[in-house]
């Protein structure tokens, strides 16, 4: 590996200049994943590892200003989808490839709506990651034929709903103040237990609110709800925070 960023310190170590076609960052909150992937991928002559990060929030500004061509993102990292959305907004030239992708249909759709262009499932190999990265650099999207068909159906459904004047799913106007607060934390990728600790309320209460949020957003999963919240750019004003 020619250069990298320490997971806790966004200061480059060594010279990051290179002629590699793929200049990538790796983001995962699991140190073994970060270092293991870096060790394997850095042996490839056309891949240069620019940095390793455990916190996508801290990495956002640095990566968006870097010379990176791609980002390898662990979807298990808290706030991963929101981070992918922000990278797409700030630096659309950086291709985001996700690994540890679930096989849930709506989760894949949420990834596509966040701007992710490569998908490697939980049982994928290093070769699958390399293929996804190289395809992304060429402007291609990698996914299974089944998932490709799923995305085509999604596009068709959106077009049909607009043509008949239907209101697209994911509207947040009907959420209560508390639901908006919890929805914003769901958007951050927090679990029910994490939300309960953050707001100092019971897990059962959070579960009930999340169920109501999914119903109001017409979402079948937290991933689909998160995608709807990204589209709505949900923010919680200080006056809406309930203690």
Image: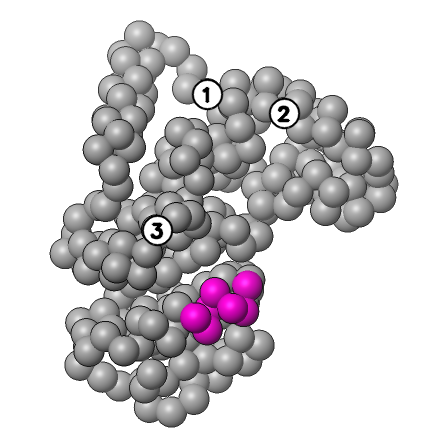
Residue 220 percent across, percent down from the top left? 52, 22
Q: Quadrant of residue 151?
A: top left
Choose between 163 and 216: the one closer to the eye. 216
User: In this view, which residue lies farthest toward the bottom?
Assistant: 14
**In terms of sequence position, does the residue under pointer 3 or pointer 2 come before the other?**
3
Magenta extent:
30-36
Q: In the figure, 40 relative to 166: above or below?
A: below
**In terms of sequence position, does the residue under pointer 1 or pointer 2 come before the other?**
1
Label 1 and label 3: CA atoms lie apart by 32 Å
Element at badge 3? loop
**In terms of sequence position, does the residue under pointer 1 or pointer 3 come before the other?**
3
Choose between 205 and 178: the one closer to the eye. 205
Q: Which residue is mark 2?
A: 213
Choose between 238 and 231: the one closer to the eye. 231
Residue at (41% x, 19% y) in the render: 168
Closer mark to the observer between disc 1 and disc 3: 3
Choose between 17 and 43: the one closer to the eye. 43
Label 1 and label 2: CA atoms lie apart by 12 Å
Q: Which residue is mark 1?
A: 169
Q: In the figure, 212 relative to 151: above or below?
A: above
Q: Quadrant of residue 19?
A: bottom left
Q: Which residue is mark 3?
A: 124
Give the main secondary structure, helix, strand or loop, of the magenta stretch. Answer: helix
> Tag 3: Cα neighbours inside 10 Å, few (<14), some, or many (≥20)?
few
Residue 133 percent across, percent down from the top left? 25, 59
Q: Are marks 3 and 2 in contact (CB under 8 Å)?
A: no
């Amino acid at each position: 590996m020619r250069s990298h960023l320490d997971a806790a310190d966004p200061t480059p170590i060594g010279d990051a200049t290179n002629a590699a076609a793929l200049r990538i960052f790796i983001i995962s909150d699991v140190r073994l994943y970060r270092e293991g992937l870096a060790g394997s991928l850095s042996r490839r002559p056309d891949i240069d590892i620019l940095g390793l990060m455990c916190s996508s929030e801290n990495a956002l500004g640095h990566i968006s200003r870097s010379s990176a061509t791609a980002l390898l993102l662990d979807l298990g990292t808290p706030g991963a989808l929101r981070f992918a959305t922000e990278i797409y907004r700030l630096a659309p030239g950086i291709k985001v490839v996700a690994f540890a992708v679930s096989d849930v249909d709506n989760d894949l759709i949420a990834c596509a709506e966040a701007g992710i262009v490569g998908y490697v499932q939980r049982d994928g190999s290093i070769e699958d990651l390399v293929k996804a990265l190289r395809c992304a650099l060429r402007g291609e999207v990698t996914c299974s034929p089944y998932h490709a068909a799923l995305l085509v159906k999604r596009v068709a459904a959106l077009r049909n709903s607009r043509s008949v004047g239907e209101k697209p799913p994911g509207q947040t106007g009907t959420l209560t103040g508390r639901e908006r607060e919890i929805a914003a934390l769901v958007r951050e990728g927090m679990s029910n237990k994490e939300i309960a600790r953050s707001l100092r309320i019971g897990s059962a209460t959070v579960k009930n609110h999340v169920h109501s949020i999914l119903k109001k957003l017409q979402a079948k999963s937290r991933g689909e709800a998160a995608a709807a919240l990204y589209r709505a750019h949900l923010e919680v004003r200080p006056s809406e925070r309930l203690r």
